Image (cartoon, rainbow, N blue to C red):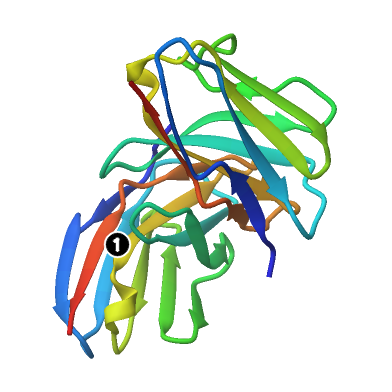
Amino acid sequence: GAVVSQHPSRVICKSGTSVKIECRSLDFQATTMFWYRQFPKQSLMLMATSNEGSKATYEQGVEKDKFLINHASLTLSTLTVTSAHPEDSSFYICSALRGPNQPQHFGDGTRLSIL
Amino acid sequence: SQQGEEDPQALSIQEGENATMNCSYKTSINNLQWYRQNSGRGLVHLILIRSNEREKHSGRLRVTLDTSKKSSSLLITASRAADTASYFCATASPNDYKLSFGAGTTVTVRA
């Protein structure tokens, strides 16, 4: 089956640090990837849609300058949390879409803790 | 944004019993998907059911879709301890590929 690799799985860093999270589709080309945020015991909230070769589309209320997304190739999207603060601590999950009317394939998530 | 609601929020059953959870949504959909999430992990796709389908099976899983009531159900038969997880429904709109997730049902299967 399709595999999406997300790295790192856990990050602990000081306030003010920028953190980059990578999402790779290992066995298919993904023109579209998605980034989600999940708070404890809650559902996934879509942050942005990452499109290969073009700018990401952000959901309402998500700061694009805070959460930088780059989709440089058909197999890699990155999310950079810039100047992270404790309120950015969360579980971030990416997914990749193989094609229309197909399920999304999810990475294992990144637990981000800002001290 | 979330458009789905799921019930129950939590379910605790004995191994071997069946587990049923329901999902309701508000707008038109292209398809509806069910995912499982183990604690601290990503989501695993279970079943995708298209808007013109009414029922789908995969192993011990059975999904129904009633577009007139804008609702879906997931049945897990003969549950096992390994089925302990959170289960989410997600709807895909006709216009784009984005998913809207329900609040999820936490299922605990007691051995």
B108 over A102 or under it: above or below: below
Q: Residue A50's x, y, as percent?
A: 69, 31
**Measured from the top left, where is residue A73 in percent x and y?**
84, 36
Is residue B97 toward the left or the right of residue A8 in the image?
right
Q: Is residue A108 above or below residue A17?
A: below
At 36% from the left and 47% from the top, the residue drawn is B102
Q: Nearer the viewer, residue A29 or A59?
A: A29
Q: Residue placed at 55% from the left, 14% from the top?
A: A82
Query: In this rendering, does residue B96 appear at all?
Result: no
Question: Where residue B110 sits in the image (x, y, percent)?
Answer: 16, 79
Q: Which residue shows up at 33% across the image and 75% down it? A: B83
Mark 1 belongs to chain: B
Q: Is residue B40 left or right of residue A108?
A: left
Q: Does B33 appear above or below B64?
A: above
Residue A101, by quadrant, is bottom right
Q: Nearer the viewer, residue B21 or A77?
A: A77
